[in-house]
């Protein structure tokens, strides 16, 4: 390949890249135009630790789902359903239950509902 052809290809490629950067994409939705599906007050309510759990979440399932989403990835405590109506406390890598004689902790749905104030 000669030097003139190489410069031409480089200039052409540079021109194509520069022009494509200035072209707006018409198939991408503008995030400012889209309404949020969850009201802003819901997020504030969930993160307001001064409120009891039963006031921050609609029911036990919503709370357990939130724990799984927020605590499992960071090795926090959450509850895993091991069979219908029975949940096992998951402690992550920070404290492994069942190791060195420590018994795994299981709870019935009713126990968790009482513990977190969803049932009296």
Image (cartoon, rainbow, N blue to C red):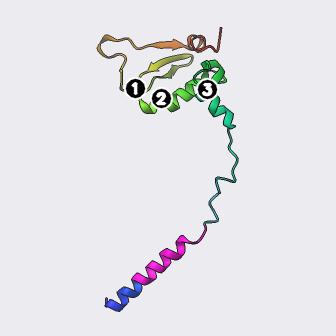
The residue positioned farthest toward the left in the image shown: 100
Q: Quadrant of the N terminus?
A: bottom left
Please provide the residue range marked out in magenta.
Answer: 10-24
Report the Cα–Cα distance between label 3 and label 2: 14 Å
Q: Quadrant of the C terminus?
A: top right
Q: Is the Cβ of the residue at disc 1 closer than 8 Å to that at disc 2? A: yes
Give residue 90's position: percent from left, percent from top: 44, 22
Give residue 91's position: percent from left, percent from top: 41, 22
Which residue is identified by label 1? Answer: 92
Q: Which callout, 3 or 2, points to the residue nearer the camera?
A: 2
Q: Circle 2 — which element? A: helix
Query: Is 110 a magenta residue?
Result: no
**Chain-order first, disc 3 or disc 2:** 3
Give residue 33's position: percent from left, percent from top: 69, 54
**Label drawn at residue 71:** 2
Dot 3: few (<14), some (14–19), or many (≥20) neighbours within 10 Å? few
Residue 69 drawn above or below residue 12? above
Dot 2: few (<14), some (14–19), or many (≥20) neighbours within 10 Å? some
Residue 13 drawn above or below residue 42? below
Q: Circle 1 — which element? A: loop
């Amino acid at each position: 390949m000669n030097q003139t052809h190489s410069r031409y290809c480089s200039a052409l490629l540079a021109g194509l890249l520069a022009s494509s950067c200035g072209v707006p994409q018409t198939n991408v939705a503008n995030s400012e135009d889209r309404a949020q599906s969850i009201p802003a007050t819901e997020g504030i309510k969930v993160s307001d630790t001064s409120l009891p759990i039963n006031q921050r979440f609609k029911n036990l399932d919503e709370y357990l789902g939130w724990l799984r989403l927020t605590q499992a990835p960071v090795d926090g405590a959450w509850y895993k359903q091991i069979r219908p109506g029975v949940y096992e406390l998951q402690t992550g890598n920070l404290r492994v239950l069942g190791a060195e004689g420590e018994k795994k902790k299981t709870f019935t749905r009713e126990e968790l509902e009482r513990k977190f104030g969803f049932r009296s």
